[in-house]
Amino acid sequence: MNLDDLALQIQNIRKRVGILQSKSEQQKVEQNIELVTAVFEEVYLALEGLQIANENLQQQNKELSDAQQALVVEHQRYQELFEEVPDAYLVTDTQGIIQEANSAASTLFNISKSLLVGKLLENFTFEKELITFHLKLIHLRERQIPEWKTQEWEVYLRPHEKTPIIVAVKVAAVRNQQGELVGLRWLLRDISESKRIQAKLEWAEEAMRQALAKERQLSELKSRLLTTTSHEFRTPLAAIHSSAELLEYYRHRWTEERQNTHLRRIQKSVMHMTQLLDDVLVLSQDEMSKLGFNPRPLNLAEFCQYLLKQLKQYDGSQHTITFSYESQSTQANFDAQLLRQILNNLFSNSLKYSPIGSQINFFVTTTNDGAIFEIQDFGIGIPSADIKHIFEPFHRATNTSNIPGLGLGLSIVKKAVDLHGGEITVKSAINVGTTFRVIVPFASNVHNTYAEVRENLTTEDVQE
């Protein structure tokens, strides 16, 4: 029986007593005893009802007190769990305004819970991700996502007076009995360190993959070098052997000119083998990351003249080599070894792929910033389909199959030009000729003076 039923019962008793009182005044005195008896019976019954109502009220009060106590215990348990969660835990309204926050959230955002409550959660997001975060909030509000289903993503957050962190977000909807969205529960975990570790592991894995790929590349390179160089060395070695043998048996019968012809043949073959060895050495140094860049002061005019002298000896006057030099400064900083590799290989190709008796033009121009080298020949040219591959190791143009070569020279030229911070371009047409243009900036880091470099050159190196 509730309070409303009890009040109704008391009201009915009052009515009954009033009726009995009215009847007692109208009836005779001898009938009063029966009337009083009836009244007492009515009152007794009413008291019995009141007793039952009182007992029911006490039971209801006890149940209500127990429920309130259980609610207090449950709320305390919820608060303990709320605080004991190791990750940041937040409760927000549907707009993302923080209503509750645990200690882990206070630590994560580097701000006290009292100051955290009432703030918009999206205000702590990184600027670049603010729009994305806001759109996700709209998605949570507009979609009928069940309470048991969480939405997960990663976001950059900006804790108070701390560097941004990467946070894994889990968010679930809070709905009332009518299914209406009334709030959001957020679980935030700082994964910055795990991301850093993951990035390091990925970097290490990538470095290992690159190292293995490099090792395979070196193994393939060694195999190709052994195969190709052994083949390429046979021709000059055969020439040396035959000329030496002929000189040994017939020099006493030959004229001096004929003897010199075979001596020049030997000399040319040795120079060719030396060039092959130099190319292989440079390539192996580059593949092993030992190919360095060491600029020194260099008299470019003397350097080019000495280089031309060597080339003419190598060529044996089979081609006409012209030299043009225009300079605002004769002395600048270059890596002489790399520069020699550049020019030697370009000239070697021009001589090799040009008909005997043709002309090779060598133009050198210097400015205040660098030097421009152009080597022009009128040889067989390079097919247009091969132009984009000519600087790749072991690549040879399709029209050179009957001409010996390793296919390393231009790849070495490109590497040496890159080490100088320069650039190389090529123009070519089949059976018209080829022009290579190399632009090399002056190096700024100087290790010795020009006098020291000159002391390291032989007398022959600096004389015309």
Image: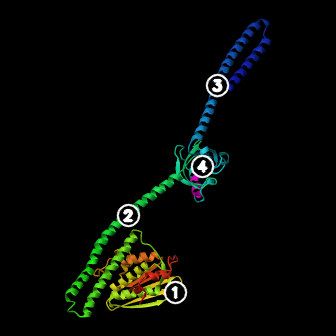
Task: Give whichever of discs 1 and 3 has the lower sequence position.
Answer: 3
How far apart marks 2 and 4 lie (CA) works out to 43 Å
Q: Which residue is mark 4?
A: 108
Task: Give whichever of discs 4 and 3 has the lower sequence position.
Answer: 3
Circle on res. 62? 3
Magenta span main SS: helix
How far apart marks 4 and 3 lie (CA) works out to 44 Å
Residues marked 1 and 4 touching at CB (< 8 Å) = no
Residues marked 2 and 4 touching at CB (< 8 Å) = no
Q: Nearer the viewer, mark 1 or mark 4?
A: 1
Q: Nearer the viewer, mark 2 or mark 4?
A: 2
Name the secondary structure under disc 4: helix
Stretch in magenta: 129-138
Residue 38 x, y percent position in the rendering: 72, 11
Circle on res. 329? 1
The amino acid pointed to by label 2 is Ala
Residue at the spot 58% in from the left edge and 50% down from the top edge: 141
Q: In this orientation, which residue lies closer to the viewer: 362 or 402?
A: 362
State whether residue 135 is above or below residue 93.
below
State whether residue 380 is above or below residue 177.
below
How far apart marks 2 and 3 lie (CA) works out to 79 Å
Circle on res. 213? 2
Query: Can you see residue 420?
Result: yes
Quadrant where the C terminus is found in the figure: bottom left
